Amino acid sequence: MTDAKTRIDETVKAADVVLFMKGTRDTPQCGFSSRVAGVLNFMGIPYSDVNVLEDEEIRQGIKEYSDWPTIPQLYVKGEFVGGCDIITEMTLSGELDTLLEQNGVSFDKAAADKIREANG
């Protein structure tokens, strides 16, 4: 598992925002991954996507790395943020905006506001 842990660690530190997901940003392979990728895409957040379905070591290793049992998993500046439910809640409350701003990650504030309006 050390090899997978090393690769995961390098991946989460290589980009400001990383999403470990089932599928890719353009073709998500599960509803939860689709929801989180959809939020990131709609808000124009630059991120790296990692398809855990392509690598069983990464798929299992990411769960141990974060001590979080489900996928997708979002990382900002190398720190685990959460899965689908947490990202959804953070988006709707504005906490995700704050986290991104604090970490210097660009995003479309108007798009974030539209998400909240549509779900308010």
Image (spheres, helix red, strand yellow):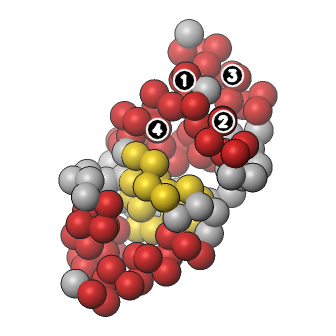
Residue kind at label 4, given as amino acid type: Ile
Q: Residue at x 61, y 19 (%)?
A: 116
Q: Quadrant of the C terminus?
A: top right
| Residues at circles 4 and 1 in contact by the CB criterion of under 8 Å | no
Give the residue at mark 4. Answer: 87
Q: Residue furthest bottom?
A: 3
Is the residue 15 above or below the residue 109 in the image?
A: below
Is residue 22 shown left or right of residue 106? left
User: Furthest-front residue in view?
Assistant: 102
Q: Amino acid at mark 2?
A: Thr
Where 66 falls versus 99 (above or below)? below
Q: Residues within 10 Å of mark 2 (few under 14, many from 20)?
A: some
The earlier-in-sequence mark between 4 and 2 is 4
In front here: 101 or 19? 101
CA separation in Å, label 3 and label 2: 16 Å
Which residue: 31% across, 83% down?
4
- According to the picture, the residue beneath numbered tag 1 turns out to be 92
- For the N terminus, which image quadrant? bottom left
Residue on which the image places disc 3: 114
Sequence-wise, the earlier of marks 1 and 2 is: 1
* Nearest to the observer: residue 108 or residue 15: 15
Q: Amino acid at mark 1?
A: Leu
Q: Secondary structure at mark 3?
A: helix
